[in-house]
Amino acid sequence: MLFVTGCSSILAPQPDPARFYLIAPMAGDARTAAARNDLSIGVGPVNLPEYVQRQALVVRTSPTEVRPSDIDYWAEPLGQNVTRVLGENLGALVGTDRIFAFPSPGILKTDYQVVVTFLNFEQDSAHQGVLSARWEIRVPKSETVLITRVTSVTKPAAGAGMDGGVAALSAALADLSRDIAAAVPAHTGRPSH
């Protein structure tokens, strides 16, 4: 009888411990009240390091070691999530609804194209969000590079564990969005080129 009871508790379905996360866009009150305009911006390509482009969240435990989680996962491919949120943030900050994400064919007809190469986009062992990215603003029609810069930021964990780390990464991406938006020429009207 004890054997049967023990087996049935072992064979009973166990709750799935997996948790799924998304990078979040800036909160409404964190966005500037940019005047709406008809400026068009292409976002991408956005390149992330290969070691973070996996379904499992990665935590850097030392300068040379990263550990993927066994239960914490991205709800969508991280590159798509980051590109979408960066576009949402830029649209709000610059004041346009005309945002095109790479590889949309419309990106080549935009006023400006933002290309981002992330050097780091990860949580450290304290679940701080660490971001370092080289970015540029281009004029696709003339293939001119207007600005090339690097943004590096570390944001404190916004809570405990992975959830706090993902919130910190969202805040770091918001800072990057602000840097890029501040560099976009002609915020309040169509650029001349």
Image: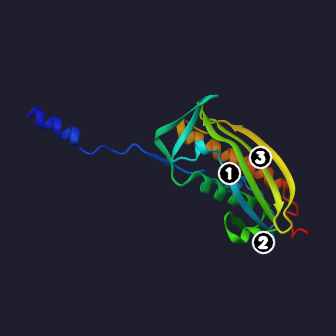
* Residue 91 in sight from this viewpoint: yes
Marking on residue 109: 2
Number of numbered tags placed on the structure image: 3
- The percent position of residue 180, horizontal first and vertical second, equals 79, 53
Type of amino acid under label 1: Asn
Which numbered dot is residue 47?
1
Between 40 and 97, the one nearer to me in the picture = 40
Helix, strand or loop status at disc 1:
strand
- Disc with the residue nearer the chain's start (3 vs 1): 1
Residue 63 placement, left or right of 160: right
Residue 132 point in image, percent of width and height: 73, 41
Report helix, strand or loop for mark 2: helix
Among the two numbered marks 3 and 2 on one chain, the one whose residue lies closer to the N terminus = 2
Residue 97 seen in render? no
Work out whether mark 1 precedes mark 2 in sequence or the reverse, and give the earlier one: 1
* In the rendered image, the vertical position of residue 186 relative to residue 70, given as above or below: below
Q: Position of residue 163 (x, y in %)?
A: 54, 42
Neighbourhood count class around disc 2 (C-alpha, 10 Å): few under 14, some 14–19, many 20 upward: some
Circles 3, 2 touching at the beta carbon (< 8 Å)? no
What residue does disc 3 label? 134
Secondary structure of the residue carrying tag 3 is strand
- In this rendering, position of residue 38 left or right of residue 25: right
Task: Identify the image quadrant of the C terminus.
Answer: bottom right
**Residues under labels 1 and 2: Cα distance?**
21 Å
Amino acid at dot 2: Lys
- Front residue of 94/122: it is 122
- x, y percent for residue 20: 49, 49
Taking 23 as reference, is 58 above or below it? above
Residue 60 figure quarter: top right
Where 96 falls versus 89 (above or below)? Answer: below
Residue at x 70%, y 54% (from the top left corner): 29
